[in-house]
Amino acid sequence: MSGGGLSDRTLVWGTATTQLIGWGTLYTPFPLMIAPMEAELGWSRVLLNAAFTCGLLASGLAAVPAGKWLDRHGARGMMSLGAFAAALLLLGWSLVRDPVAYFAVWMLIGVAQAACLWNTAMALVVAEARDTTRTITAITFITGFTGTVFLPLTDALITGLGWRGALQALAALQLVAAVITFLMLRQARRPSPAAVQAAARVPLRDRLRDPAFAGLALCFAAHAFLGTGLAAHLIPLLRERGWPEATVLLLAAAHGPAQVTARALLFVAGQRVTMRTVGRFATTLLPVAMLALAAGPGSLALTILFVGCWAVADGLLTIVRAAGTAEILGREGYGAVTGALSAVAVLPRTGAPLLLALVWEGAGGYGPLPWLLVAVGLVAAAGFVAAARRR
């Protein structure tokens, strides 16, 4: 790499701040915008959600070229451009009156997400950090509060300003994040010619044929399926089992604190544990969690076990996805490799809520659904174990 470089402290605070704002403005507010947009514009919820899904697909498809650009040129230009574009697109979203324009805005938001959000940020950290694992873990402490901050903030903005005014306020916040990104990345190192040549020596198509890549792709795709599927269906599932509403909400809310606890323990452990070890532990918890959910529909103890195991696994795998990929597949061509992993996961991530809804509809309830999740958890564990064998 060439250039002055960023300290780990700068990486933690700069990246965490810009990612918290980026996810908080580009992703978190969407569910809160549906009802007021539907009321004003008269569009169906299917249409509103379809555009959001198109944005997710665009983000996944753009991840590979974005990753290749990172490997050749570094994060400086692309992250800054993506962050500024995101602010403009939020403003554009606030002005839409036509479905075609709405879909176009969301597809461009997806491209902006690929340019400035998690994959790109983690490629920056892997390239710059002295202690990659601790830096990523520290960043996730802060970004874990995205929903805590931006859900009530967005709700208050919609109440006070309407959905259009709320989006304009969020665009202003994203503009602040873009300025922080630009200022931070002025000191970022550019890839050296040797690093660019090293990445180019093994073309991406050859990396895609690596069994370790296939294992990680399987693991992370299964994890993405579980994450979005449970986000959409966990609360209705618990309600169907007859738990009091307060208990349902408490169980759902416990996910965040359990995640933070797991990440805190990993931060303390630091370099004493490898990402292979962390990944094996986390992916073992996935089928255990889903089995507890499936086996104990009337057991509070088993439901609590599910919540704890799922939250810990989910929290750790967010870190393994960034740092573990570098440990197992190497740092050369990291941007393109992680972009390809994201592209593989985009269909499971976007399709899980619909597929699980179809299972619910076909079965007349959530009875068989947790057993499907057990199978998905086993797939994730098997994929990671296969990938971790690579030396």
Image (cartoon, rainbow, N blue to C red):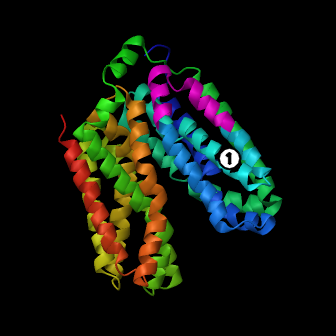
Helix, strand or loop for disc 1: helix
Point out the stretch of residues depicted in magenta. 64-85
Whether 66 is drawn above or below 31: the answer is above
Instruction: Categorize mark 1 by other alpha carbons within 10 Å: few (<14), some (14-19), many (20+).
Output: some
* Residue shown at the point (66%, 61%) measured from the top left: 48
Whether 322 is drawn above or below 361: the answer is above
The mark tally for this picture is 1
Query: Looking at the picture, how far across and down is residue 83, in whole percent?
Result: 63, 36
Judged left or right of residue 222, residue 180 is right
Whether 169 is drawn above or below 5: the answer is below
Task: Look at the image and say whether residue 83 sits in the magenta stretch.
Answer: yes
Query: Looking at the picture, how far across and down is residue 253, in whole percent?
Result: 49, 68
Task: Look at the image and say whether residue 152 sits in the magenta stretch.
Answer: no
In this view, the residue in front, 64 or 168, is: 64
User: What kind of residue is marked 1?
Assistant: Ala
* Residue shown at the point (41%, 75%) measured from the top left: 359
The image quarter containing residue 113 is: top right
* Residue shown at the point (52%, 38%) measured from the top left: 62
Most common SS among magenta residues:
helix
Q: In the rendered view of the protein, which quadrant contains the C terminus?
A: top left
- Which residue is disc 1 drawn over? 104
The image quarter containing residue 68 is: top left
Query: Looking at the picture, how far across and down is residue 296, in whole percent?
Result: 31, 81
Judged left or right of residue 300, residue 233 is right
The image quarter containing residue 110 is: top right
Residue 280 visible in the shown view: no
* Residue shown at the point (49%, 14%) measured from the top left: 3
Q: In the rendered view of the protein, which quadrant contains the N terminus?
A: top left
Query: Looking at the picture, how far across and down is residue 125, in whole percent?
Result: 45, 32
Residue 192 visible in the shown view: yes
